[in-house]
Amino acid sequence: MHRDHALTVHDHAPLAAGPAGPLRIGIGGPVGGGKTALVAALCRALGDRFSIVVVTNDIYTTEDADFLRRNGVLPDERIAAVRTGCCPHTAIRDDITANLDAVEELVARHDPDLVLVESGGDNLTATFSYGLVHAQIFVLDVAGGDKVPRKGGPGVTLSDLLVVNKIDLAPLVGADLEVMRRDADAVREGRPTVFLSLREQPDAGPVAQWVATQVAARRG
């Protein structure tokens, strides 16, 4: 059986200073890992406690934003879609103008407590600029194999929270969760990791807890 790390505000170093205003959390990771499902889960779990807005990134479409709207996780006007037209990491790390514009427009309109910025699907090198966000969540899934955490890369090693999703698939793909846990612990230098299945835990409990703690800390 898997076990979740206990998550508290003391689990890692303080978040980046980042931009002024409400807490901004970037959610990145490879295609199909469950980023949009996690955003939806966080909106449902925290929407009664905090005012939330979301910016999604897709290369050519607005598919992720459309998914969130169809599922009614937030009012439509609280969701903005960015078409990057380029490799996803460029729009969240190298030229963040489109995302900054989308975030700042939503913040001006809604004065939220929490901004979630979902990257388009990318590889293990994907990270967010700290001119755009204060904290980063990186989402993997076990279908990629239990070797992925030990491959490292900035997304795995430096994210404030690593989420290993779809653990219910581990027996089907021959992935060893304890190997993944050991390797994640080895490369992350004390930063927290959560193992979950959004299919079995649709409230994303430990991730929502971590996010809520960061929002409370940001509000002082």
Image (cartoon, rainbow, N blue to C red):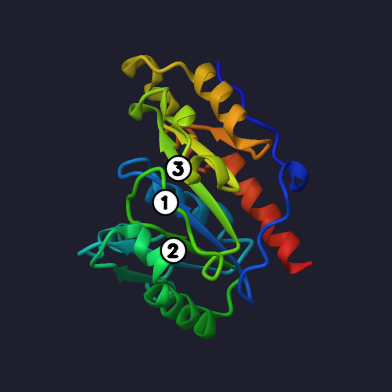
Whole-angstrom CA distance, mark 3 to mark 1, is: 11 Å
- 188 or 35: nearer the eye? 188
- Sequence order check: which comes first, mark 2 or mark 3? 2
Instruction: Give the amino acid type for the residue marked by disc 1 in the picture.
Output: Ala
- Sequence order check: which comes first, mark 3 or mark 1? 1
Whole-angstrom CA distance, mark 2 to mark 3, is: 17 Å
Report which residue position mark 2 lands on. Answer: 93
Horizontal side of residue 181 vs 172, given as left or right: right
- Give the residue at x 75% y 48%: 9
- Give the residue at x 51% y 18%: 179
Q: Residues within 10 Å of mark 3 (few under 14, many from 20)?
A: many
From the image, state whether disc 3 or disc 1 is nearer to you: 1
Residue 200, position as x, y percentages in the image: 45, 31
Residue 144, position as x, y percentages in the image: 34, 29
- Give the residue at x 28% y 59%: 87
Horizontal side of residue 81 vs 153, given as left or right: left
- Sequence order check: which comes first, mark 1 or mark 2? 2
Report which residue position mark 1 lands on. Answer: 126
